[in-house]
Image (spheres, rainbow, N blue to C red):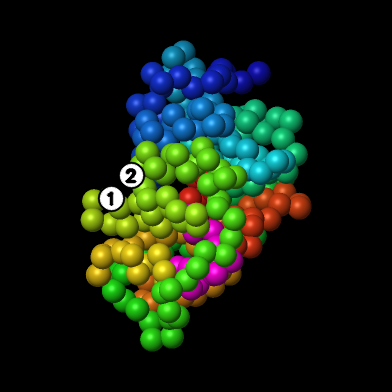
Amino acid sequence: MPEFDLRDAKPDDFAALAAIAKAGDSEADDLYLTFLQTSGVLRVAADAGSILAFGGVLGIGDDTTMVTDLFVATHARGRGVGGALLAHLLDGAGKRMTFSSKHAAALPAYIRAGMVPSWRLLYLRGRSGARDEHAGGVNHEVTTDPWRRARPDLADYFERRGGSITDNAAVITRDGETIVARLQDHGRADAFDTVLAEVPANEIVTCCAPEHSPVAARALARGFEVFDNDIFCCSPGVALPDDLHCLDPGLC
């Protein structure tokens, strides 16, 4: 039997969860944790009132469970806490997916949970004024169904973050940086150019794009650099929409 309890997270836990995430080189503020708690599942492993780990899952589409977070406090590692919590979160789940960090313990845990590593999600950073001579025009017409119809909770979350929500994108400006949090459009790289055309000149822009996306190629052509990456891991039969070119690795 494990020497810890698995339970739903409470708002009083949020400060501890944020500290655990920070120690894992990530962020988990109250707004994010509240969204996950209300739209998905957020649970903790605790021992005598001390939070050892936390994790979350979110439903994607009709039949896929996404692991959004799995963090273990530094002093609790090596006790099987993360594996037990992951199994608890995925109990009863069929199709499953996650974006794994490069932490040495992450990929093996997800593989054991039936999620096979696939492609890289590139974290890209550049400037809005760094246009490539081959980049297309910016008069792009949205060619996809509005993503916010399928994900109204996520659109509301990005809006609470101060984001500008359109039929094909969510763009957040914070501390002098513009984040393309979502871009879903069959227009591919031309849609990315159109989004950047709305950003003030020479402003820092970041986004996360699948390495096989034409948006990743366009960003690199415009002088963007890769500053990090995650690994998409999934069970058989799971695939992201082919028109999803920029996404939030914690919420998809």
Nearest the eye: 37 or 101 = 37
Q: Is residue 199 left or right of residue 123?
A: left
- Estimate the x, y position of residue 64 in percent, counting from the top left: 68, 42
| Amino acid, disc 2 | Gly
In the image, 39 versus 67, the foreground residue is: 39
Among the 4 quarters of the image, the one containing residue 135? bottom left
- Outermost bottom residue: 133
How crowded pointer 1 is (Cα within 10 Å; few <14, some 14-19, many 20+) is rated as: few
> Residue 70 at what x, y percent from top left?
52, 37
Query: Residue 19 location, x and y as percent?
Result: 35, 33
Give the magenta part as a residue range: 181-192
State the residue at coordinates (45%, 39%). 156
**Where, by quadrant of the figure, is residue 220 drawn?**
bottom left
Residue 221 shows in the view: no
Residue 35 visible at all: yes
Which residue is labeled 1 in the image? Answer: 174
Q: Residue at the spot x=49%, y=22% of the render?
A: 9
Q: Nearer the viewer, mark 1 or mark 2?
A: 2
Q: Are marks 1 and 2 in contact (CB under 8 Å)?
A: yes
Q: Which residue is the site of mark 2?
A: 162
In-front residue for pair 172/79: 172
Residue 194 vs 114, above or below: the answer is below
**What's the distance in space between the residues labelled 1 and 2, CA to CA?**
8 Å
Looking at the rendered structure, the secondary structure element under dot 1 is strand
Q: Amino acid at mark 1?
A: Arg
- Which quadrant: the N terminus? top right
Residue at (30% x, 69% y) in the render:
127
Q: Earlier in the sequence, mark 1 or mark 2?
A: 2
- 53, 33: nearer the viewer: 33
